Image (spheres, rainbow, N blue to C red):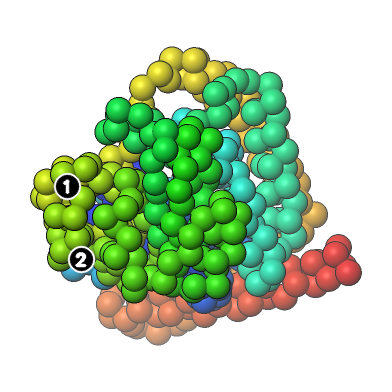
Amino acid sequence: MNFIVLGISHKTAPVEIREKYSIKEEDLPAALNALKNIEGVLECAILSTCNRIEIYALTLADDIEDIKDFLLKRSDLSNPMDEQHQSWIYTFEKEKALEHLCRVSSGLDSMVLGEPQIFGQMKDAYNLAIDLGTAGSVFRSLFPQIFSVVKKVRSLTNIGHSNVSVSSVAVGLARKVFDGIQGRSVMILGAGEMGELTVRNLLSQGVKKVYVTNRTFEKAVTLAETFDGIPVMLYEFSEYLPSVDILISSINAEGYVIKRDQVAETHPLRNKRPLLIIDISVPRSVDPDVARLENLHLYNIDDLKSVAETNLSIRTEEAIKANQMIKEYALTMLNKLNADEIVPAIVSLRDKAEEIREQGYEKLINSLNFPEDQKSQIENFSKSIVKQIVHQTIVKMREHANLLRYK
């Protein structure tokens, strides 16, 4: 068996590429079930955030091409299988995969080093896999160990010192655009966690008025109540733009929600007052062309990276300590994974099936005079049949083990 991580992140591809691969929250169950149905995948989970999409899978064999194809073909980009697309995808296996998963969960691989939100997002990804049945006995054992490692890393190092996040970086950006943010007004598009955190940080720094809009107006009303703010119908948001200083867009939608013409129409009413728009949506929800308007400052999630890279000396030193801890814990987890009581049976079953296949293939080939191209076809066919049989057998073995362990 093999534990693998396969993904694309802010470190390998810009937002205009990542948004093509992102999976909406409502689409995750279908994506997980499709991933689980790939031949050789025993257990799986998917993490999809504004900065990364990652697949975590327990596989029957070392061949991960089918899983890579699954991710590559999700995009609507032309020629998703070409070399450039392949370069955006990274893969880790076994111990390195466990190290990477711990690093991501700890915030060590985040755009803002040490940010805490990713830990909750990883828990959500795991819980969804549990709910859908794509996480079995190995993941039920493995992920809690990873979460325990994250807590130790964050408690025994200062990686979370000053507790910065994308939302706090956005606040710092607002301070640079305006002389001060005391008394300023903010509008939030979308009722997601990141947008809400950004508004909370702005309020703590003196922002006074909050407008909230969302595709579902009831959610806008609920969120506005928590801020003592004003709920706005999504189709009416442009009417409020002349009164807004800061616009935070974290809405999940197809295409650009905020278009250049909408902003340009109301822009003269601002009397040359600056407007800061921070688009933290992936896919992006703000038309990049709005940046051409006078006194308008547009930043997307990748633009925040340069701001986040300042004042990192303390965290960088602590990251070295954290990475060393993770290396040690990952080795321990891998040893436990290999000691899983069902793993030896799976390995034995797979090896025995391959032995029987090879013997049968050799006997057939030696008894008849097949051309070389037919020999290759027969061998590939026999491998495919055995792989399918073994996969289905192991799936049933794991289902039975889960029932016994968690009934």
The amino acid type found where label 2 is placed reads Gln
Residue under the image location 55 percent in, 29 percent down: 163
> In front of the other: label 1 or label 2?
1
Residue under the image location 72 percent in, 38 percent down: 148
Residue 153: x percent and y percent?
65, 28
Residue 216: x percent and y percent?
49, 74
**The C terminus lies in which quarter of the figure?**
bottom right
Q: Are marks 1 and 2 in contact (CB under 8 Å)?
A: no
Q: Earlier in the sequence, mark 1 or mark 2?
A: 2
The amino acid type found where label 1 is placed reads Asn
Q: Is residue 276 left or right of residue 139?
A: left
Q: Is residue 154 left or right of residue 269?
A: right
User: Within 10 angstroms of label 2, few (less than 14), some, or many (20 or more) residues?
Assistant: some
Residue under the image location 48 percent in, 32 percent down: 205
- For numbered disc 2, what is the local secondary structure? helix
Residue under the image location 32 percent in, 60 percent down: 240
Please state which of residues 88 and 267 is positioned toward the viewer in this rendering: 267
User: Within 10 angstroms of label 1, few (less than 14), some, or many (20 or more) residues?
Assistant: few
Give the answer, above or below, for where 325 lies relative to 300.
above
Please state which of residues 174 and 267 is positioned toward the viewer in this rendering: 267
- For numbered disc 1, what is the local secondary structure? loop
The residue under label 1 is: 271
- Is residue 321 in sight in this rendering? yes
Please state which of residues 275 and 407 is positioned toward the viewer in this rendering: 275
Residue 311: x percent and y percent?
40, 18
Give the answer, above or below, for where 130 lies relative to 164.
below
Numbered disc total: 2
Give the answer, above or below, for where 353 lies relative to 302.
below
Please state which of residues 213 and 325 is positioned toward the viewer in this rendering: 213
Q: Is residue 34 left or right of residue 262?
A: right
The residue under label 2 is: 262
